[in-house]
Image (cartoon, rainbow, N blue to C red):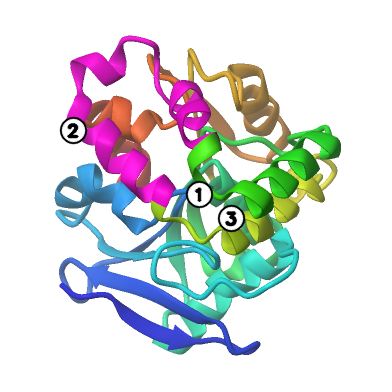
Amino acid sequence: MEKQFVTIGDGCRIAYRLEGPEGAPVLLLSNSLGTDMGMWDPQIAAWTAHHRVLRYDSRGHGDSDSPAGAYSIDRLGRDAVELLDALGIEQVDFCGLSKGGMVGQWLGHRAPERMRRIVLANTAAYMGPPSGWQGRIDGVLANGMAPLTEASIARWFTPDFPARAPEPVEFIRTMLLANNPQGYAGCCAAIRDMDQRVTAPLIAAPVLVIAGEQDPSTSVEDGAFLANSVQDGRLVTLDAAHLSNVEQPEDFARAVSAFLTA
């Protein structure tokens, strides 16, 4: 189906798709930094068997608007809540990867009444130091997306995966290059300023944390911290780097489905 749009409180237009059987529980998906809702394509067929799947392009990504300036995790979280409000959806299951998982952490403690079960994939409660993110912001605003694209691909996939599976890697590379540098930088600022370590114990909903055993960005240790800090957490690891849902699509889909339908 074609993307649809809602305009939220601050005037930002958010693109979304709603797929799957009407009347089924809703699963909200939130994309990683540098991608868009298309990153979830490998899982949609499996998940629409048991959920109505709502995915959206995060502010600053895909076909959503990219307002100028720094964003915050609070702003990105409220985008998700306002999307649910606009569509009249009271409660959802949630799955987010990387930045999307950071949004999920925020929703877990700031909008707990909207969350049933939460999947936090390849993410962390804190990703310091802030200086590293500021360097990335400065670089992308000065030079665009191209210089950081290959470094991102190298972190996101295990070394032999691009040769084994060139099509999904090229799909992700195209997404990265299509990013609005202003929107990408705005989301980098949200991660730069984020520290959700102290609020993780406030998350009461059941949580599945998925970590990539070869993820250099958000480690298994980062995942274990979250799984051990929330009130009802469990950890699954996959043989993958950062974009584990792209590198291990079937295993990722099965782990999420088993948790959501338990």
Q: Secondary structure at mark 2?
A: helix
Residue 118: image tag = 1
The residue carrying mark 3 is 184
**Would residue 204 be visible to someone looking at this image?**
no
The percent coordinates of residue 223 (x first, y second) are: 61, 27
Q: Residue at x 72, y 39 (%)?
A: 125
Numbered range of the magenta stretch: 148-177
- Of the residues under marks 3 and 1, which one precedes in the sequence? 1
Separation of residues labelled 3 and 1 (CA atoms): 25 Å
Secondary element under disc 3, as helix, strand or loop, is helix
- The dot on residue 167 is 2
State the separation of the CA atoms marked 3 and 2: 24 Å
Residue furthest to the top: 160
Along the horizontal axis of the image, is 237 left or right of 42?
A: right
38 left or right of 50 in image: right
Q: Amino acid at mark 1?
A: Ile
Q: Within the magenta stretch, is there residue 154?
A: yes
Residue 249: percent from left, percent from top: 25, 32
The percent position of residue 19, horizontal first and vertical second, equals: 21, 68
